[in-house]
Amino acid sequence: MDRNRFMQQMEFIRTIDKMKEIGRQTYLADGSRKENDAEHSWHMAVMALLLSEYATQKVDTGKVMKMLLVHDLVEIFAGDSYAYDPKAQASARARELEAADKLYGMLPKEQGSELRALWDEFEAYETPEATFAHTLDNFQPMLLNDASDGKSWREHQVHQESILNRNKKTAEGSEEIWEYMQELILKNRKKGNILD
C-alpha cells in the first residue's frame, strides 16, 4: 500500500464529512428542520437512480449519480449560496472555483482530476448527464418545498418569476419532470406559498 496516497484519501474523507454541517434553506419533507448538503446530495443520487428513464437524452445513470454526489462538495469551503439570493449568487462562482482547487487538490492526482472533471462538467451544463443532474438539482428542493407546504418559499417570499428563471433550462433535462414541477408551482402559487 502507498501510505501517502492512503493518507491523502483519509484526509479528503474526513474533510467531506463537513458536508453534514452545511445547512441549506430547504426544509425536510416533514418541515421539522432544514436539510444539509449531504442529505441533499444523497437524495438526488437516489432520484437519479430512479428517474433516469425520464431524461430527455439517454444518460449514464452512474455518472449522473457521481456528479450529484460531488457537485456540492465545494460548499465545504465556499458555503451554500441560496438559489433565490442574488447577492450570494453573484459571488458564488469565484468562491466555488477556489474551493474546487483546494478540495480536489487534496486527493491523489488522478482521483482529484476525476472528481474535478465531474464538477466541471456539472458546472458547464453541456452534456446530457450534466443537464439531467441540473434538472434533479432544481427538482429536489421543489419536491421538499411542496411537501413542507412551501415553508422555505414562504420564509424567503419567493416569487414565481424567480422560480421560472431558475428553471428556464430544466425541461432540457426532462420534459416530464418539468411538467410535474409546473404543476407544483401552480399548486403552491394558488395556496399563496409562492408569490406572483
Image (cartoon, grey):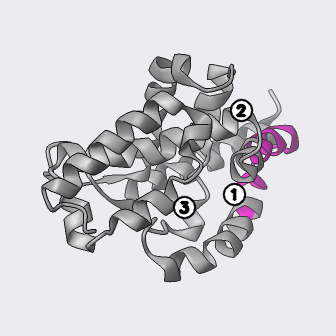
Say whether disc 3 or disc 2 marks the residue closer to the N-terminus.
3
Whether 37 is among the magenta residues is no
- Mark 2: which amino acid? Pro
Residue in view at x 18 percent, y 59 percent: 151
Whether residue 64 is visible to the viewer of this picture, yes or no, is yes
- Disc 3 crowd rating (10 Å Cα; few below 14, some 14-19, many 20+) is many
- Disc 1 crowd rating (10 Å Cα; few below 14, some 14-19, many 20+) is many
Does the CB distance between marks 1 and 3 fall below 8 Å? yes
Q: State the residue lying farthest toward the bottom.
A: 87
- Horizontal and vertical percent position of residue 6: 73, 37
Q: Quadrant of residue 40?
A: top left
Q: Quadrant of residue 85?
A: bottom left
Label 1 belongs to which residue? 103
Does residue 192 appear to the left or right of 92 in the view shown? left
How far apart, in angstroms, are the residues tagged by discs 2 and 1?
25 Å
Q: Nearer the viewer, residue 160 or 132?
A: 160
Does residue 45 appear to the left or right of 130 in the view shown? left
Q: Nearer the viewer, residue 97 or 136?
A: 136
Whether 108 is among the magenta residues is yes
- Horizontal and vertical percent position of residue 123: 70, 53
Say whether disc 1 or disc 3 marks the residue closer to the N-terminus.
3
Q: Secondary structure at mark 3?
A: helix
Does the CB distance between marks 3 and 2 fall below 8 Å? no
- Horizontal and vertical percent position of residue 8: 73, 46
How far apart, in angstroms, are the residues tagged by discs 1 and 3?
8 Å
Q: Tell us which disc is closer to us: 2 or 1.
A: 2
Does residue 185 appear to the left or right of 137 in the view shown? left
Label 3 belongs to which residue? 76
Q: What is the span of residues highlighted in magenta in the rendered image?
A: 102-117
- Mark 1: which amino acid? Leu
Label 2 belongs to which residue? 128
Residue 127 against residue 119 in the figure, above or below? above
